[in-house]
Image (cartoon, grey):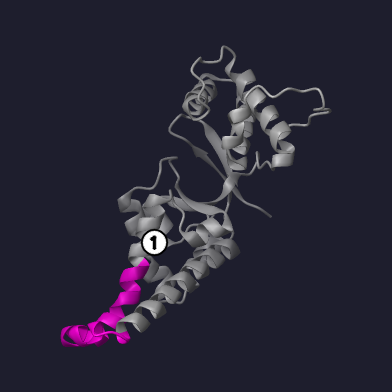
Amino acid sequence: MAQSIEICTAQNVTIEYELATLRERAMGYCLDILILLVVYIMLISVISATVVSEWLGSMGWTQIVATFPFISFFTYNVLFEIARQGQTPGKKAMGIRVVRLDGKEPEWSDVLLRTLLHLADSIFCMGVIGALLIKTTSRHQRLGDMAANTTVIKLYNLKYNFQLADILKISSSDNYEPVFSQVRSLSEQDMIFIKTVLDRRKAYNNQAHNEVVEDLVTHLMPILQIKTRPADRVEFLKTLLRDYIVLTR
């Protein structure tokens, strides 16, 4: 049975997310290790075949070869989880990401702490401790998550996990003329997010959710090259959804 968690964002909007399963996290971790292994083998092969190996020999080639996997592992995780908002390539492939339980984006200190504690719950124990904690804790947290106040969630929230086909049910589009043809520049994920915001606002019609709608409209206007702010923000977003389906179906 899927487990979920509610996270309150910086805009005081509470969103329910489905927690990533042990299988999804393990597969994402293995994909990351595979990527690092391929890079490591390629780099060692290149260095061994060049004169660089002779230069490195005087510096302790064996020590460099032994420590490089650890250094690259930490660098890889820290840089990707900061630059890609909690997603390494492996996590992205599995559709999961790291989030802080207070709704904020993970900071350098959080990511560094999570990565360092891989030593204790993933690397030195072959992942046994991490797997047990993820499987048994209510928020699916390993030691690194507990220390950094983070967890790993699926990319879309549980209650509003839409597919493109769910966005709008248009009975007939034969006579419909799209208003914003530039909506083609938006992605399917963008449209799913717009639909999620509208449904959250409909379910919880309060100031916080109205502010999220306003912020979303502000964000979309320059992207769609719209200079005049729509009078009805909600209807504007609904029109974008309708236009997108008609223009891309």
Q: Quadrant of residue 101?
A: top left
Q: Is residue 197 visible?
A: no
- At 47% from the left and 23% from the top, the residue drawn is 218
How many numbered discs sit on the rendered protein? 1
Q: In the image, residue 206 lies at what x, y percent? A: 55, 20
- At 58% from the left and 62% from the top, the residue drawn is 24
- At 44% from the left and 52% from the top, the residue drawn is 86
Q: Which quarter of the image is occupied by the N terminus?
A: bottom right
Q: In the image, residue 179 lies at what x, y percent? A: 66, 21
- At 57% from the left and 63% from the top, the residue drawn is 22
Position of 173 relative to 62 (above/below):
above
* Residue 75 is one of the magenta-drawn residues: no
Position of 159 relative to 43 (above/below):
above
- Within 10 angstroms of label 1, few (less than 14), some, or many (20 or more) residues? many
Viewer-closest of 237 and 247: 247
Q: Which quarter of the image is occupied by the C terminus?
A: top right
> In the image, is 244 to the left or to the right of 36?
right
**Segment colored magenta:** 48-73
Q: Is residue 204 visible?
A: yes
> Tag 1: residue type?
Asn
* Residue 59 is one of the magenta-drawn residues: yes
Q: Quadrant of residue 122?
A: bottom left
Position of 37 relative to 80 (above/below):
below
Viewer-closest of 53 and 177: 177
Kindly identify which residue carries mark 1: 77
Position of 34 relative to 163 (above/below):
below
Q: In the image, residue 214 lies at what x, y percent? A: 50, 21
